[in-house]
Structures are given as C-alpha cells and as structure tokens.
C-alpha cells in the first residue's frame, strides 16, 4: 500500500488480565527487553522476552513485543507466529490482533488482514486502527461505500490522532467524483498534519480542486 498508510505505533485500549498476572521476575525480564528493543538492540531484547515467557508461559505482552521485534527486522513469518501466540495467551486483548493486521496490510494480505480485523472488532467495534485498516482494504478493492463507512467509524473513535483517515476519505470521495467533500478532507488532513512529507502534493491537489470549483 501507499506508504502514507504506514503507522508507527499501535494503541489498542483494553488492559490484558493475563499481563497483569505476570510474576515479578517475568515482568522484570519484560521491562529489560522493552528497554533494549527501544534502543534497537533486537537480539538482546529477544533474549529477555524469551526469559519472560520461560518464567510465565501465558505472557501475551512478551509474545506481542517479540512479534514487534521480528517485524522490525522484516521477519514476517516469525512475527505472525508470535502475534498469534499473544492472541492465544489472551484472546480478549486487542493489541496483538492490531499488530498482526498492520503487518498483513503492509504485505498486501487484505484477505488475512480483514479476517484479523473481524476478530478484534468483535471484541471492540470502536477501535480506530482496525476500522481504518478495513477502510484501506475496501478502498483497494474499489468498494468505496464500505471504505467510507469503516473510515468514518475510525474517525469517530480516533478524534484527530490519525490524519491518514482524512487523506483516505478524500481519496474515497474523489473516487466517487465528490469534489467538495474531497476538498474538505484534504484541507482537514493538512490542518491535522501540516508537516507531512506529502503536504506539497496535497496542497497542489487542493489548489486544483479549488480552481475547478470543487469538481474532481
């Protein structure tokens, strides 16, 4: 997909009870691993996460972080396996589903991504990222009405944290030859994300639409 959709972080509400039950030693190993992963010392980080799951085999956060480390090193198969282990350890915790869906999206596996989103949205239908990912999937298939519906659901929960939603809505409206709505969404994207790498191109598109009186 367009690199505009690349999202660096995942926030998925809902606290995992299984994570809270981790023994202190497992938590200490997890914290060390997280610290090293932040410094991109991936091998050392994995060693600590591995120790954490040796102490506490049902530790969803440790598997989830290991998945993120493998994803950062472009090991999609290992990452997917670990996200699935995190899901297995706590099927009601959204974070690993969202990470798995994000990775599937980045590899253009729209079918797999939408199946993952279906499961996580059954836990919490308001989560912005899975709704946004679905919108991207529907848009790529030319299913503009469903894309708009998913994007608007994402926007309601997101409250301006993810400007990419505005950009996707603009493209959906352009696809439906709805110039005025596309123009409004492009302007909102620039307002929310003035420093975007693609801001000059978006500004040029805004000027074109304004010259055309909002007609695409």
Image: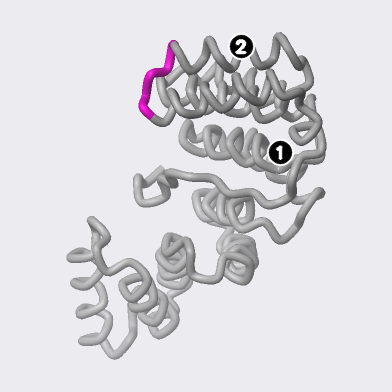
Residue 82: x and y in percent read 63, 20
Would you say 13 lies left or right of 180 here? right
Q: Which residue is found at the position 65% from the left and 35% from the top?
A: 96
Give the residue pinned by disc 2. 50
Residue 71: x and y in percent read 48, 25
Would you say 147 lies left or right of 212 here? right
The reply to whether discs 2 and 1 touch (Cβ–Cβ < 8 Å) is no
Predominant secondary structure, magenta span: loop
**Nearer to me, 70 or 205:** 70
Q: Residues within 10 Å of mark 1 (few under 14, many from 20)?
A: few
Q: Answer with mark 2 or mark 1, whichever residue precedes in sequence.
A: 2
Question: Mark 2 or mark 1, which is nearer to you?
Answer: 2
**Nearer to me, 2 or 64:** 64
Q: Which residues are magenta?
A: 39-43
What label sits on residue 115 in the rendered view?
1
Q: Secondary structure at mark 1?
A: helix
* For residue 124, above or below residue 99: below
Marks 2 and 1, how far apart at CA: 28 Å
Quarter containing the C terminus: bottom left
Q: Which residue is found at the position 71% from the left and 9% from the top?
A: 54
Q: Which residue is found at the position 43% from the left and 23% from the top?
A: 36
Is residue 40 found inside the magenta-colored segment of the image? yes
Residue 53: x and y in percent read 69, 15
């Amino acid at each position: 997909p367009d690199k505009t959709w690349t999202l660096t972080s995942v926030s998925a509400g809902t606290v995992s009870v299984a994570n809270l039950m981790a023994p202190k030693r497992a938590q200490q190993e997890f914290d060390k691993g997280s610290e090293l992963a932040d410094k991109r010392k991936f091998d050392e980080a994995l060693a600590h996460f591995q120790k954490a799951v040796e102490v506490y085999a049902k530790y969803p956060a440790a598997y989830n972080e290991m998945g993120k480390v493998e994803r950062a090193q472009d090991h999609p198969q290992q990452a997917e396996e670990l996200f699935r282990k995190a899901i297995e350890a706590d099927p009601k915790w959204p974070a690993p589903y969202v990470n798995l869906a994000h990775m599937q999206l980045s590899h253009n596996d729209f079918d797999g991504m939408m199946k993952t989103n279906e499961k996580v949205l059954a836990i919490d239908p308001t989560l912005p990222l899975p709704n946004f990912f679905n919108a991207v999937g529907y848009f790529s298939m030319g299913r503009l009405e469903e894309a708009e519906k998913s994007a608007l659901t994402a926007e309601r929960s997101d409250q301006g944290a993810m400007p990419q939603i505005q950009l996707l809505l603009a493209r959906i409206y352009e696809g439906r030859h709805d110039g005025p709505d596309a123009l409004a969404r492009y302007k909102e994207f620039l307002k929310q994300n003035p420093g975007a790498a693609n801001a000059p191109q978006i500004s040029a598109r805004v000027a074109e639409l304004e010259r055309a009186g909002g007609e695409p």
